[in-house]
Image (spheres, helix red, strand yellow):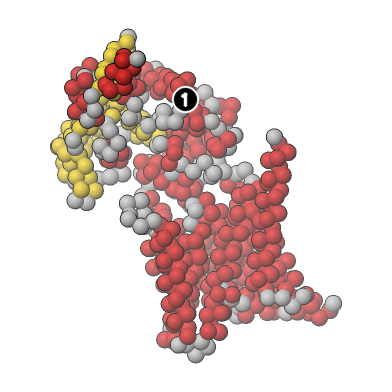
Amino acid sequence: MSDPLVRFQEVQLGYGRQVVLENVQLDIFRGDFFGLVGPNGSGKTTLLRCLLGILKPLSGEITRSAGLRIGYVPQREMLDPRFPLTALDIVLMGRYPCAGVFRSPRRADRDFAMQCLQQVGLADVAHKLYRELSGGQRQRVLIARALAVEPNLLVLDEPTNGLDLPTEAAILGLIEQLHAQSGLTIVLVSHVLNVVARYATRMGVLLDGRLLVGDAEELMQEQVLEEVYGVPVCVQRLDHHYIVAVREIEEACSDE
Amino acid sequence: MSDWLETWQSPMVQDALRVGIVLAIVAGYLGIYVVLKRIVFVGAALAQVSAAGVALAFLVGWNPLLSATLFALAGSLFFAQSWSDRRMSREAVIGAVFLTFSALTVLLASKGAHGMEEVQHLLAGDILAVAPEEVWRIWILGVLVLVAFLLLRKEFLLVAFDAETAQALGYRTRWWEFAFYLMLGGLIGAVIHLVGLVLIFGYLVLPAMGALLLCRHVASAAAVAIVNALLATVAGLLISVVFDLPTTATILALMSAIAALEGLASAAMSHSSR
């Protein structure tokens, strides 16, 4: 197997004296679709920030392959839509590092940004203001911006939050397409278990300050998820889909 | 009629006009980022911190410009920090800084040679009292700040809009934040003892507000903010000369009126487009 794009070796993550995750061992290989799940406050964001290089580990080593370019798609809710920026303006931000300080993006950067918008199906709204776009369109704009970096690793933080079912399916379909057709390595952070289990080739589950890594079949087990979430769950498999329900509700429904 | 024309053409008014024009351009432009970054009261707090620096300078006999600038730079360093992991909200801290340095300014000035008159001057300023040698200093500083900001505008915009992605792209956002506050603080520190706290605060807020209500893009908003500020400055100076009104208040009133009109125009345009 080739060298991983990113390797976490015995990494301890946290802030100051507060340790959030211990002994993290994780390899992300080229072509992976890695899904990271866990309850609120389990350390997903901490691990993500470390992966992006924003947060330094408390101990251990994180190795990144030479020439690694990470395209990051943040949570939509973190951005202020009142900024008077068009979809193209935002996607162009992905080209800023190429342009360099003191220089404006060139014509070639603008053309590439337009291509990225086209790739996500939004070429026709390039000059529309970000605040005038729907939630799904805004999410696509952020994905296009990440693509403008020309990444070999795409990291998405909760990309389907607040989206209705068809829009969620469309966004996930786009991500899957980027993985399958463009060969992009994906790291998807989500609290929606069935979404991650459906699409990821490998999963990471955060439990009691540790990261468990495996495939969906290994980790989407009732005893594993009960330990992670602290509630009794029921897991059913339907084709490629996992359906996870909290057991009390499932029993209440069956009583009716 | 000829009286006010003679007054208008006097060196005192022409110097005030020159200072006003450079402030209108630079602060009008920076104001776009101040409003978008939601740091409006940081501008006021920095202005107050600078005012305390001036009050201290007059009390102990230091150079007021140097003192104001040093205080402003220290304030910039303080406000450039990240506040996401703190126990107290950023707004509360800004308020506390504003109030603390307001009190300090009054206390220091009360012991100075001119007492409360100095406090009044620091608050309201007097653009008409700018000395000729100050005009060129402010122009040089203004041009430097504007050129630096124009060259770095895309990085400032990215950090303002999405600091986390900026970090993921390799930008050291803390340094960019500090650079922004440094320019803002430097500008405020350099002019506070000349034009007063209220006027510089007004330049950083009102023209940008009106422009952002009216315009759909950052670039056009910046241009309109500068026009707003220039219009208010020139007309404000002229009206204050003709009708013998306080200059600072006249300029501010015009800035407010322009912002209000642009707000109404924006509301009318949205209504008609439905």
- The relative height of residue A191 versus residue B215 in the rendered view (above or below) is above
- Provide residue A164's location: percent of width, then percent of height: 47, 25
| Residue that label 1 marks | A164
- The relative height of residue A49 versus residue B124 in the rendered view (above or below) is above
- Provide residue A117's location: percent of width, then percent of height: 51, 28
- SS at badge 1: loop
Q: Is residue B20 left or right of residue A8?
A: right
- Provide residue A182's location: percent of width, then percent of height: 39, 20
Q: Quadrant of residue B129?
A: bottom right
Q: Residue at x 59, y 26 (%)?
A: A124
Q: What amino acid does circle 1 point to?
A: Asp
Q: Residue at x 65, y 77 (%)?
A: B128
Q: Residues within 10 Å of mark 1 (few under 14, many from 20)?
A: few
Q: Chain of mark 1?
A: A
Which image quarter is the N terminus of chain A in? top left
Q: Can the viewer see residue A107 in this picture?
A: no
User: Which of A150/B228 is in front?
Assistant: B228
